Amino acid sequence: MSYKASFRVWRGDADSGELKDYTVEVNEGEVVLDIIHRLQATQASDLAVRWNCKAGKCGSCSAEINGKPRLLCMTRMSTFTEDEVITVTPMRTFPVIRDLVTDVSFNYTKAREIPSFTPPPELKPGEYRMQQVDVERSQEFRKCIECFLCQNTCHVVRDHEENKEAFAGPRYLMRIAELEMHPLDVADRRDEAQEEHGLGYCNITKCCSDVCPEGIHITDNALIPMKERVADRKYDPIVWLGNKLFRR
Ligand code: SF4
Ligand code: F3S
Ligand code: FES
């Protein structure tokens, strides 16, 4: 069964823009990205949208649908009523390039700031051994498709451009936690997480976890354990004594 849906799509560039109204055909089984593609094919050939896999795996088609951060390709039209106006806007936290496409380079900058996996120097590749339980712990974090919806949602940077320099965001704090929990990573990442990547800005609101299309428990399994490790270090009596003696 087909019907005509009312869409409001943000059109514009870095300088200015506005919501434009369209009426578009919808067919059974379609997702929002199908409708955006139909819009391009029939009424707005210059509409910019980023996508690649149409299977929820490349993380390219992130946007906001009725104000909620979502993947366009994983949002079924059947979740809306036929008379509902569906508003599609670009991710708010990142600068707009054009229409629904944003400049997500903030995330690449943050990724580069995290020192990579640091195994013990005496071990050669091929000699790494670890317990299955440790493999499984990090596997959840490895499901990340880098859609940046969590980064877009976190209130620490969503309306606070001024916090971007000091805060890596949930996706990259999770990366630090993954490395910190890795039994073969010898770098001590706790001070860095707190002081250079802004772990202290996170007040565990869990909004990041709520929008993750992979269902990763970012807050419960990465950010809170990381905060606990930072607190353990701070209140460790030996570390406290060391700081007193050597960091005056
Ligand atoms: Fe996207 Fe989830 Fe990865 Fe964040 S953690 S970038 S929401 S897949
Ligand atoms: Fe932001 Fe997630 Fe923490 S939304 S405040 S990083 S729990
Ligand atoms: Fe790949 Fe949507 S197009 S996640």
Image (cartoon, rainbow, N blue to C red):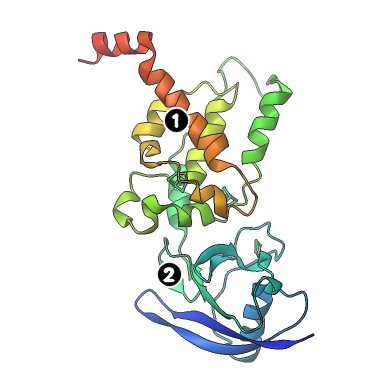
User: Nearer the viewer's eye, disc 1 or disc 2?
Assistant: 1
Q: Quadrant of the N terminus?
A: bottom right
Q: Check residue 227 in the rendering and tell me which mark sits there, or answer none.
A: 1
Residue shown at 49% from the left, 36% from the top = 223
Horizontal side of 30 relative to 246 (left or right) equals right
Which residue is painted at 48% across and 23% down in the image?
Answer: 187
Q: Quadrant of residue 178?
A: top right
- Determine if the C-beta at disc 2 is less than 8 A from ligand 3: no
Quadrant of the rendering where the C terminus is positioned: top left
- Up the image or down, 115 lies above or below 165; here it is above
What is the crowding at mark 2: few (fewer than 14 residues within 10 Å), some, or many (at least 20)? many
Residue 13 at x, y percent in the picture: 41, 77
Residue 238, image x and y in percent? 37, 8
**Residue drawn at 54 percent across, 67 percent down:** 63
Ligand 2 quadrant assignment = top left
Q: Quadrant of residue 129?
A: top right
Q: Which residue is mark 2?
A: 96
169 on left or right of 79: left
What is the three-letter code of the residue carrying label 2?
A: Val
* Residue 6 image offset from top left, x and y in percent: 59, 86
Q: Is residue 120 visible?
A: yes
- Horizontal side of residue 16 vs 24, given as left or right: left
